[in-house]
C-alpha cells in the first residue's frame, strides 16, 4: 500500500486563452475545475498503475465533494479530516499560442492545533498498514513548517518508508528526520545548495550530500534536462525522452509515484528509476488531468535510456 498525504489540496482552475497578454484583456476560451494537489496527484497515479493506493489529508466542506468524486471514479480510497471553509483555488492560465502556463496559487484555509493533532494520529494509523508514505506539497496556514518532520518521526519504527517531496523550510526540516527518499527539482536543489548546478557532475555532488545526511535515495527531476537519481553506491541519469509534451503539470508527482511503486516491488535502483521516468513521461503526453494510460506507460518503460554517471 502506498499512502499519499495531502495537507493542502487545491482545485486547479485551468483557464485557456488564445494569447496571454499581461496587463491586458484576456478572453477565456475554455475553463475546467479539477480536484488536485500533489498528494492527490500521487495517489491517483499509483492507482492508475494498478497498485494499492490511498489519499489522506485535510479536506473542506466547500469543494470537498469534487475530490471525493474524482478519487472514487479512479478507485482510490480516501480518508479526510473535514474542516470548515473552502478548498483553495489555484488559477492556471494556459496560453495556447506558446504553451506556457501562468499560475496564481492561493495559500489555503487556516488549520488549528486540534486538527494538526488529529492529522498526526491519522497518518500514524494509516502508516501501520502502508509500505510507503508520500509527503508532498505545501502546507496550509497555521501548519508549522516542520510538520513533515513531525510526521516522519511519528511513524518511525512502523516499517513504513517515507518519501518527501517538498521545498524550502519544509524540506530543510524534513531532512532532519531522515526520510527514505527526497525528490527535489533542479531549482529546489539549487536553492538548498545556494548555487547554480549547471552540470551533471555538480548535480551528482549536491545529491550525494543528502545521502551523507542520512537520506537513502535522492531523485532530482530536471524538466527538459531529464532526471538523476542516486543511492550513494550508484548514480544514474536519464536524458529527456523524445516525446510530444502536452503538459507538465503533475509530472514530478508521477515520478514520485513511479519510484515508490518500483521500490515497493523491491526492484533495484535502475528499474525503479526507469518506472519513475516512464511515469513522468506518460504524464507529459497525457492531455489535461486524465489518468495516465498504462499502455503508453509500458511502451515508455522500454524507451527510457539510463546512463551511469
Image (tube, grey):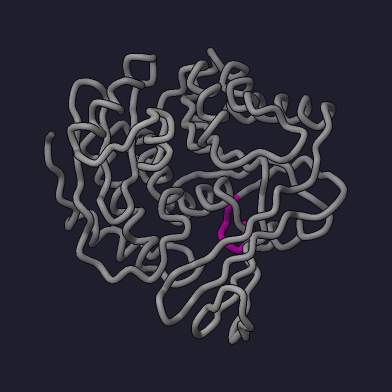
Q: Position of residue 126 (x, y in %)?
A: 63, 30
- Please tell me which residue lies in front, 164 or 48: 164
Q: Is residue 223 visible?
A: yes
Q: Where does residue 281 sit, x and y in percent of width and height?
A: 32, 58
Is 111 above or below relative to 246?
Answer: above
Question: Could you say where residue 236 lies in the image, as x and y percent from the top left?
Answer: 19, 36
186 versus 205 height, above or below? below
Q: Nearer the viewer, residue 107 or 136?
A: 107
- The answer to whether 278 appears left or right of 108 in the picture is left
Q: Quadrant of residue 147?
A: top right
Q: Residue furthest left?
A: 308
* Nearer the observer, 1 or 132: 132
Q: Quadrant of residue 158?
A: top right
Question: Which residue is pictured at 85% across the width and 51% down the height?
Answer: 85
Furthest-front residue in this view: 23
Q: Is residue 206 left or right of residue 68?
A: left
Residue at 57 percent of width and 30 percent of height? 170
Any part of residue 268 in sight:
no
Q: Can residue 11 be found in the magenta stretch?
A: no
Q: Which residues are magenta?
A: 71-76
Is 251 displayed left or right of 169 in the figure? left
- Taking the spot 32% from the left edge, 14% from the top edge, the residue there is 212
Residue 63 at x, y = what percent?
A: 77, 60
Quadrant of residue 34 within the rendered picture: bottom right
Location of the C terminus by quadrant is top left
Q: Residue at x 23, y 30 (%)?
A: 204
Q: How many marks?
A: 0
Seen in the image, is 113 located left or right of residue 169? right
Amino acid at each position: 500500500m502506498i499512502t499519499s498525504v495531502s495537507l493542502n489540496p487545491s482545485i486547479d482552475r485551468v483557464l485557456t486563452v488564445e494569447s496571454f497578454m499581461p496587463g491586458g484583456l484576456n478572453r477565456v476560451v475554455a475553463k475546467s475545475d479539477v480536484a488536485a494537489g500533489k498528494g492527490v496527484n500521487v495517489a491517483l497515479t499509483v492507482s492508475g498503475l494498478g497498485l494499492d493506493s490511498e489519499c489522506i489529508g485535510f479536506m473542506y466542506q466547500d469543494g470537498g465533494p469534487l475530490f471525493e468524486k474524482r478519487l472514487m471514479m479512479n478507485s482510490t480510497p480516501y480518508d479526510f479530516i473535514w474542516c470548515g471553509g473552502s478548498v483553495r483555488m489555484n488559477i492556471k492560465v494556459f496560453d495556447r499560442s506558446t504553451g506556457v502556463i501562468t499560475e496564481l496559487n492561493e495559500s489555503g484555509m487556516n488549520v488549528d492545533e486540534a486538527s494538526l493533532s488529529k492529522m498526526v494520529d491519522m497518518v500514524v494509523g494509516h502508516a501501520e498498514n502502508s509500505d510507503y508514505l508520500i509527503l508532498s506539497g505545501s502546507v496550509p496556514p497555521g501548519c508549522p513548517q516542520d510538520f513533515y518532520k513531525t510526521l516522519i518521526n511519528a511513524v518511525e519504527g512502523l516499517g513504513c518508508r517515507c518519501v518527501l517531496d517538498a521545498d524550502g523550510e519544509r524540506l530543510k526540516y524534513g531532512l532532519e528526520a531522515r526520510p527514505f527518499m527526497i525528490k527535489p527539482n533542479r531549482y529546489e536543489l539549487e536553492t538548498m545548495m545556494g548555487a547554480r548546478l549547471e552540470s551533471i557532475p555538480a548535480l551528482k555532488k549536491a545529491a550525494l550530500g543528502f545521502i551523507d545526511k542520512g537520506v537513502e535515495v535522492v531523485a532530482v527531476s530536471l524538466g527538459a534536462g531529464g532526471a538523476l537519481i542516486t543511492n550513494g553506491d550508484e548514480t544514474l541519469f536519464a536524458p529527456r525522452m523524445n516525446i510530444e509534451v502536452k503538459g507538465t503539470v503533475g509530472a514530478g508527482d508521477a515520478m514520485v509515484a513511479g519510484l515508490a511503486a518500483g521500490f515497493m516491488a523491491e526492484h533495484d535502483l535502475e528499474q525503479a528509476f526507469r518506472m519513475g521516468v516512464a511515469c513522468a513521461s506518460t504524464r507529459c503526453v497525457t492531455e489535461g488531468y486524465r489518468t495516465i494510460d498504462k499502455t503508453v506507460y509500458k511502451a515508455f518503460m522500454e524507451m527510457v535510456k539510463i546512463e551511469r554517471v
